Image (cartoon, rainbow, N blue to C red):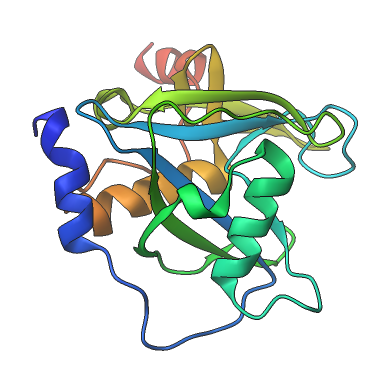
Amino acid sequence: MEARLLTQQLQQSLRFSKRIQPAHAAVLIAITHEENPRILLTRRSLYLNNHAGEVSFPGGKRDAQDISNIVVALREAQEETGLNPFDVQLLGDLPMQKARNGMLVKPIVGLIPPDVELIPQPTEIDRIFFASMKQLLETPASPYEVRFAQQSLYFPSLRVENEIVWGLTARMLISLFRYGLNYQKEWPFLLNSPAFKINLEL
């Protein structure tokens, strides 16, 4: 698919769910409205208690006064990156995702100007960067090692802009490609490590 047609297809395919379910948290998948669209990503601060140093979309937990998932996503994006909610052209939402801690997270999708100026909130965000949607579509999954107490597991990940995108954020990207672009990217639940594959072949 040509890069210049990606935002057009997203606009045609995405809608907001008629069945509204308040989520525990929401994120904003912000995509630049340009010929070669890019997706806004952040790297979480190393000083956070949860998911420190991981790549994520701007977003966070619902506050008591938040009236909708959209409000949560826009408020959190503004707090973390300085993104003006009025600069976001909302397109729709994606199916609810469950985080490792059981929290239900709602992805909200919108277009933003390509020249938008953003400033990371230093207590929450170490880096703001943009990844080419075309590159994310074309990059094959590679193993990412996650160490647990008794073993290591290898999850599929994408390597972009010198960062590793995996877990919930990667699953949301796969969902965006499926529902927004009708593109089914190969994404297994687990991947074997390269060394493990070599051992199997010997």
In the image, residue 169 sits, relative to residue 180, either above or below, namely: above
Residue 100 locus on image (x, y percent): 68, 56
Residue 26 showing in the rendered view = no
In the image, residue 197 sits, relative to residue 148, either above or below, namely: above
Residue 131 locus on image (x, y percent): 42, 25
Q: Residue furthest front?
A: 86
Q: Quadrant of the N terminus?
A: top left
The residue sitting at 54% across, 68% down in the picture is 70
The residue sitting at 41% across, 12% down in the picture is 198
The residue sitting at 25% across, 55% down in the picture is 180
Residue 125 locus on image (x, y percent): 75, 31
Please count the marks in the image.
0
Q: Nearer the viewer, residue 76 or 131?
A: 76
Q: In the rendered view, does 114 fall on the left or right side of 180? A: right
The residue sitting at 48% across, 31% down in the picture is 116
- Find residue 178 and report its image quarter: bottom left
Q: Nearer the viewer, residue 12 or 23?
A: 12
In the image, residue 128 sits, relative to residue 8, either above or below, namely: above
Q: In the rendered view, does 45 fall on the left or right side of 82? A: right
